[in-house]
Image (spheres, helix red, strand yellow):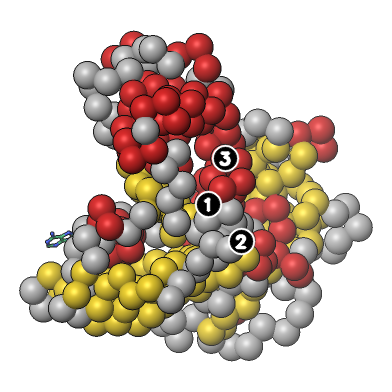
């Protein structure tokens, strides 16, 4: 049975400034948890605390029953059995792909190390590339070698800092799917640091949202998306339209919105419905792939909608709209 990797009330300060503050996060074996936040939110610092690359000022970090960090004590990174994967791959340039993967397996003996490395290269679709040096590999191949190298020693947990963001977008999806499938199969806690809400939603089982060093919400990815606890969380997971109660177009909300509150709706929650008495004018219509993104003017308020291409109206059209209550959230606004 793999152990949970758990941070409890963890704080890290640089001088007087807390860059991670009172964070508690339970990483479950077999789950990929995305740590999502903007630049400077404290994501990398929290990852470095889990990894043992930095001491913490308050709280503790445990792997199952084992204490890894508390103020005044930091089990060094190399003694934690935690695999690390960074954006820049960090392969040894003078070693082949197979030698890179075998590097952490010296205690297993040469033959066993070679066999295990070959197995991991195969799992990550790199069988034919075992003897290539890093400079002979594409970015996607290098990152898959880095992932094989991190997983081969059977770590107790894995931490990834923006591991896919350096890859060509055309490659990113397939490298990510291969890598994350191998990580899930390992059945260990995994943390994926990312600033990209789409990546978090597409890849993670759980999402933890960090802002200004504080954890705003954590939970199953679909729950955080469908049940955000604040306007900031709703907005952190993708584009939203926000309208204050006083500015709400007549009949749009379909429910009572208290004065001083704010209505937030995801673009796919703005539904085209010709039976609706609420009308909007299409000010822009842009095909973005399978869906069409509409900018709407509804009684002077701007809304963004995502609709199937096949039924998408043209710019200038007058359409009926309604809001899907499951994708519409009402919060007291921060400035009310
Ligand atoms: P993120 O990964 O979310 O972009 P970081 O964890 O890298 O955020 O940084 C969080 C904050 O801590 C930033 O404001 C950054 O400037 C600051 N910071 C990070 N490392 C140090 C350091 N070694 N000394 C002082 N400030 C730091």
Q: Answer few, some or many: residues within 10 Å of disc 3's Cα (few below 14, many 20 plus, some between 14 and 19).
A: some
Q: Does dot 2 land on a helix, a strand or a loop?
A: helix
Q: Nearer the viewer, residue 103 or 305?
A: 103
Residue placed at 29% from the left, 29% from the top? 91
Precedes in sequence: disc 1 or disc 2: 1
Residue at image position (54%, 45%) is 183
Which residue is painted at 35% across and 82% down in the image? 9
Quickly name the residue at label 2: 221
Which residue: 74% across, 44% down? Answer: 307
The image quadrant in which ligand 1 is located: bottom left
Provide the residue designation for mark 3: 182
Would residue 260 be visible to someone looking at this image?
yes
* In contact (CB < 8 Å): disc 2 and disc 3: no
Residue occupied by mark 1: 200
Pair 3/1: label in front: 3
| Quadrant (top left, top right, bottom left, bottom right) of the N terminus | bottom right
Looking at the rendered structure, which numbered label has been put on residue 177?
none
């Amino acid at each position: 049975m793999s152990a949970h990797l758990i941070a409890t009330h963890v704080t890290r300060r640089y001088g007087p400034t807390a860059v991670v503050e009172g964070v508690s996060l339970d990483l479950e074996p077999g789950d990929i948890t995305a740590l999502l936040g903007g630049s400077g939110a404290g994501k990398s610092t929290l990852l470095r605390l889990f990894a043992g690359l930095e001491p913490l000022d308050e709280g503790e970090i445990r792997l199952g029953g084992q204490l890894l960090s508390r103020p005044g004590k930091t089990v060094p990174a190399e003694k934690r059995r935690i695999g690390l994967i960074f954006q820049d791959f960090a392969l040894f340039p003078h070693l082949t792909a197979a030698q890179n993967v075998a590097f952490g397996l010296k205690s297993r003996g040469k033959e066993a190390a070679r066999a295990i490395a070959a197995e991991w290269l195969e799992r990550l679709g790199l069988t034919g590339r075992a003897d290539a040096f890093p400079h002979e590999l594409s970015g996607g191949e290098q990152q898959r070698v880095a992932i094989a190298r991190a997983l081969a020693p059977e770590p107790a947990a894995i931490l990834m800092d923006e591991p896919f963001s350096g890859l060509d977008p055309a490659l990113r999806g397939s490298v990510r799917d291969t890598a994350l499938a191998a990580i899930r199969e390992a059945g260990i806690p995994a943390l994926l640091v990312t600033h990209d809400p789409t990546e978090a939603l597409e890849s993670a089982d759980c999402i933890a949202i960090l802002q200004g060093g504080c954890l705003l919400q954590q939970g199953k990815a679909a729950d955080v998306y469908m049940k955000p606890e604040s306007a900031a969380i709703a907005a952190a997971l993708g584009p939203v339209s926000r309208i204050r109660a006083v500015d709400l177009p007549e009949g749009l909300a379909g429910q009572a919105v208290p004065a001083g509150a704010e209505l937030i709706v995801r673009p796919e929650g703005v539904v085209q419905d010709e039976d609706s008495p609420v009308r909007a004018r299409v000010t822009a219509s842009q095909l973005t792939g399978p869906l069409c993104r509409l900018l709407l003017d509804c009684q002077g308020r701007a809304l963004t909608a995502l609709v199937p291409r096949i039924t998408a109206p043209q710019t200038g059209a007058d359409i009926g709209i309604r809001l899907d209550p499951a994708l519409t959230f009402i919060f007291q606004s921060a400035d009310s």
